Image (cartoon, grey):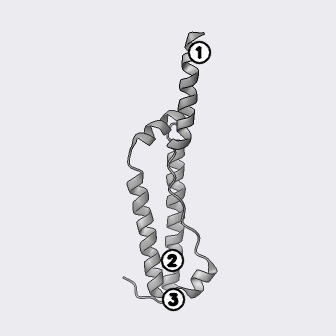
Amino acid sequence: MKKIILILPLAIFITALHGCATKNYGRQGVLTQYESDTMSCREIDLEIAKVRGFMDHINDESAFSGRDVLAILGDFGIGNSLERKAAIESAQQRMQALHTLKSRKSCNQK
């Protein structure tokens, strides 16, 4: 009985920390029709730079940290991996759409 009393608070503590352990990178929005219609070549280049910065941020934040240890205890790190993958996919989709728009508008390729 004493073991259960000691283990139960520890289990609750680990479960509570797990919610704080999963990293959140955010997402890049899809390129809207309004953006496609109104963005100039300079604005497209600036937006591409922002997406690259977002991807750099993901790579910097995905370095192993104490939150990863807690995430591994909670869900074997699957949550962080899924979050990172979804964030990168959103950035890649936006980046592809921006490059397509840049080509369609005949902007200078650098």
Q: Do tag 1 and tag 2 residues touch (Cβ < 8 Å)?
A: no
Eye-nearest disc, 1 or 2: 1
First in sequence, mark 2 or 3: give its number.
2
Mark 3, secondary structure of its residue: loop
Number of numbered callouts drawn: 3
Please determine whether, in this image, residue 100 is positioned above or below residue 86: below
Please determine whether, in this image, residue 56 is positioned above or below residue 4: below
The residue that mark 1 highlights is 4
Label 2 to label 3: alpha-carbon separation: 10 Å
Residue drawn at x 56%, y 35% as measured from the top left? 16
Q: Amino acid at mark 1?
A: Ile
Residue drawn at x 43%, y 80% as measured from the top left? 45
Residue drawn at x 45%, y 75% as measured from the top left? 48
Q: Amino acid at mark 2?
A: Leu
Q: Amino acid at mark 3?
A: Lys
The residue that mark 2 highlights is 98
Q: Nearer the viewer, residue 26 or 41?
A: 26
Q: Could you tell me residue 95's position as x and y percent?
A: 49, 71
The tag on residue 105 is 3
On screen, residue 12 versus residue 68, left or right, reads right
